[in-house]
Image (cartoon, rainbow, N blue to C red):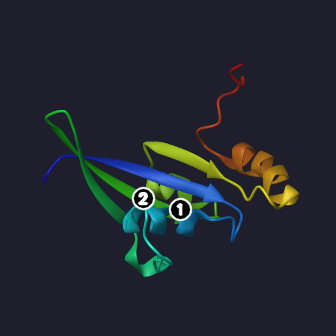
Amino acid sequence: MDGDAIRILLVGDEKCGKTSFISRLSAGEGTGPITLLRDIDQPFIFEIKLGQNPYRLEFYDTNSPENWKLLDPDIVILCYDISQRLSLINMRRHVRSSPYNPPHPRA
């Protein structure tokens, strides 16, 4: 299925669950233990169809905001580990490092 490519970048601290999230998407619901995907497999590609429109979702997994400009993502998803307070606190650093950070946060 060919469709518009949408680049999605997952950003967050190391070991906060970015790769596990993508692996779970890949394995689907109701499956047993998941096999983690490897970095060399990037982008992780999922093809979907919404209505009659096909889309190619390309997921990239990084904890390095320096890669954001190189990847030029269409969507950035900030990830953190709810069991690690520091992971949430570090979100500020990731947001400030983002080239997509608006000058005035929206309410």
Q: Is residue 76 visible?
A: yes
Q: Residues within 10 Å of mark 2 (few under 14, many from 20)?
A: many
Q: Is residue 4 above or below residue 107?
A: below
Nearer to us in this view, 32 or 52 = 32
**Residue at coordinates 71% horizontally, 25% vertically from top-left?**
105
**Residue at coordinates 18% horizontally, 46% vertically from top-left?**
3
Report helix, strand or loop for mark 2.
Answer: strand
Where residue 89 appears, x then y in whole percent? 85, 51
Residue bearing the label numbered 2: 59
Q: Is residue 103 above or below residue 18?
A: above
Where residue 71 appears, x then y in whole percent? 45, 56
Which image quarter is the N terminus in?
bottom left
Residue bearing the label numbered 1: 21
Report helix, strand or loop for mark 1.
Answer: helix
Where residue 97 appears, x then y in whole percent? 70, 49
The residue under label 2 is which amino acid type?
A: Phe
Nearer to us in this view, 32 or 8 = 32
**Residue at coordinates 39% horizontally, 68% vertically from top-left?**
27
Q: Is residue 43 visible?
A: no
Q: How many marks?
A: 2
Marks 1/2 in contact by CB < 8 Å: the verdict is no
Q: Is residue 100 left or right of residue 107?
A: left
Nearer to us in this view, 97 or 30 = 30
**Mark with earlier residue (1, 2):** 1
Q: Residues within 10 Å of mark 1 (few under 14, many from 20)?
A: some
Q: Is residue 4 above or below residue 64?
A: above
The residue under label 1 is which amino acid type?
A: Phe
**Residue at coordinates 69% horizontally, 65% vertically from top-left?**
16
Which image quarter is the C terminus in?
top right
> What label sits on residue 62 in the rendered view?
none
Residue 12, by quadrant, is bottom right
Where residue 30 appears, x then y in whole percent? 43, 64
